[in-house]
Structures are given as structure tokens and as C-alpha cells.
Image (spheres, rainbow, N blue to C red):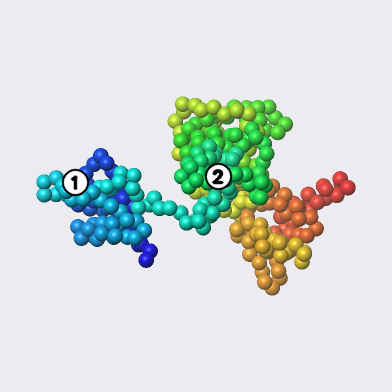
Amino acid sequence: MPLDKNKTRRFQVLDRCFADQHKKYFVEDLQEACRKALYEAGMEFPDVSRRTIFNDINEMTTNGEWKAELLPPEQSREGKQRFYRYADPNFSIWKLDLSEEQLLQLKSVLLMLRQFENMPQYDMIEDIIEELEKKYNFSLGETNGVMAFEANDNIEAMQYVGILFSAIVNKQVLKIVYQPFGKEARACVVHPHYLKQYNRRWFLFGHNQDGDADSITNWALDRIVSVEPTSDKYVECAIDWNEYFEDLMGVTQTNDSAEVIELEFSSKRLPYVESKPLHPSQKVNKTTKHITIEVKPTKELYQRLLSFGADVEVIAPQSVREVMKEEIDKMRTLY
């Protein structure tokens, strides 16, 4: 029978207490440790009685899968009180052997993780993989190209992903030298807040110390020349990033309002767009077969629509139709 959440938390606490070789936990200590864990988990008035603790201990020591063994009473008494500790200091009820099926599933997940070797903190993941290989006596070997993720092969840009990720987590202000296309490099002091990948490019979002205090700037990682830490005080960010990108297609934020874009796709392209939505706001009119998305008109939106060629027509609004027409007229002059 599966454990409820509160019992699971108590078992986790008891397991940790029983494994502690430096502190002696009496019943009252176990009660207090469990109450504290339940309170931190959101229970307002956690009640953990002595009977509850004794019932939990009984279940942990009689469970056929766990077989937890505590020090016998004669080895764990202080006066009239008894403390509780595992007989084996290395024991834990969570250190269970994996079945063959679970081991195969674990190996599959680890092989998948190895595809992210250019991602931040990958070295730590590889260390964990090596420890698991030793513990369960297996070797992952090579994947032999059975799986691939779409990624930017720009090694210099990828190296900054890890550096910037760590700076965000550790709240480190950075001096970044950045060179936009066709312009000279310039230095700026950046308070990094968020990393996002779009169209095979990585972008850093943060506060430019030389700019507006409330504005957010983004920098493409493949245009970064160098990054170094500074001693400036980090400015926190209160932005909800899911909300920030909610009405965007891409990474370019504007002050414009989101508009409902109505699109008519060719019969051969429609099923693909239905199965792979352009945006989370996508809806399909079952009568007209028209697709609508609610987004801000940005350059990324127009690039995406133009990529469909003659398979899509913008029905509304007229302002978006006009921009599409202008772009198509420019293209026509090239051919």
C-alpha cells in the first residue's frame, strides 16, 4: 500500500535521525524532528504523538522490503530512556536495490543525459553517472548516434551557457564585452537573470546597469566576446518569466499589446500546424479551419509566417497583412 505524504516525510526524517551517529535521538527528539519537517512542508499544526512514532518504527523494522534493524535496547539506553539508531551506520530504507527493469530504465535515462554534454553543470552529471556505474556495476558505453538534439554547434557560445547559468544561480554581476553584427564591441555591466534558447541560439536576459533601472535587455550568447565577474551588488529580478514570454513568439519584447492573428493554411499544411502548434495560445476554428494565435507582432512572428511560403495567408488583422505584403513585395524584387 503506498504511503501518504505525511507518513513519507516522517519516514524520511526518522531514517535520517536513525542514521546519525553523532546525536542520540530519544522519542521526544523524533517527535520534534517530525513536527518541524511537517510544519516546513506546509502543515500548520502538525501533531506527532508518541504512538505515531512507535507505529512508524514498528513499520520500518517489520517491512519485508526494508528490514530496518535498530540497536537493541541494551545498547541504546541512557538511564531509563532509550535512544534510536540503526545498528548498521550505512543502512537506509531508501538504499534499495533496483530490479533489472528499473536498471534498464535508469541506463536509458543516463544515456539521454549524456546528450547534454555542452549544457551547464554537465560535469556534475557525469560524476553522478560514474558513481551510479560503480554502484550498480554497469557501463553505459556509447550511444552510437541513436538520438540527437537540435543544438548550436558554436562551441564558444555554448561555453558561456555554463558560466552564465552559474552567475544567475550565484547572483553574480558580470562585465560582458558584446559585439553586435556589423558594430564595434562594447562593454556593459550585467545583472544576469534568465537564459532562453530560441531557434538554435541562446540568449541571456538581464538588467544592464547603464540602462533604465526597470528595463530588461537580452544578449545573444554567440555575440559575447568575454565575460568576467565584478564586485558590484546584485540586483534581484521579480519577473515571472513564464508570463514575460506568454504572448511572444521568440525573444524580442515590445511595448505593443498582443493581437489575435487569424491564419488560413493550405489543406496539406494544416494538419502539421494542428499537431505542432505555432504558439501555446493556438486555437482552431472547426467551421472555417482557420487558426488563431494571440501574440505580439514581432520580427520573429513575421519570420515564422514567411517560412510557410504560399501555405499560409494572414486573414487578420490588416496591420499584420500589410507587413507581410511589404515583405513579400521585397522578396519578389529579388526574383
Pointer 1 or 2: first along the chain:
1
Percent x, y for residue 187?
A: 59, 27
On screen, residue 30 above or below 179? below
Q: Nearer the viewer, residue 285 or 15?
A: 15
Q: Which mark is residue 25?
A: none
- Which quadrant of the rendered structure holds the N terminus? bottom left
| Residue 274 picture location, percent across and down | 67, 63
Name above or below for residue 142 compared with residue 285. Answer: above
Considering depth in this image, is 88 or 35 the residue closer to the camera? 88
- Is the residue marked by circle 1 packed among few (<14), some (14-19), or many (20+) residues within 10 Å? few
Q: Residue at x 27, y 47 (%)?
A: 87
State yes or no: discs 1 and 2 in contact (Cβ < 8 Å).
Answer: no
Label 1 element class: helix
Judge whether residue 43 can be spotted in this image: no
Where is mark 1, residue-wise? 75
Left or right of 20? Residue 118 is right
Residue denoted by label 2: 139
Rendered residue at 57%/37% (across/down): 161
Could you say where residue 88 lies in the image, as x and y percent from the top left? 30, 46
Vertical arrangement, residue 188 with respect to residue 105, above or below: above
Residue at position x 57%, y 29% from top? 227
Tell which of 69 and 321 is nearer to you.
69
Q: Residue at x 71, y 52 (%)?
A: 304
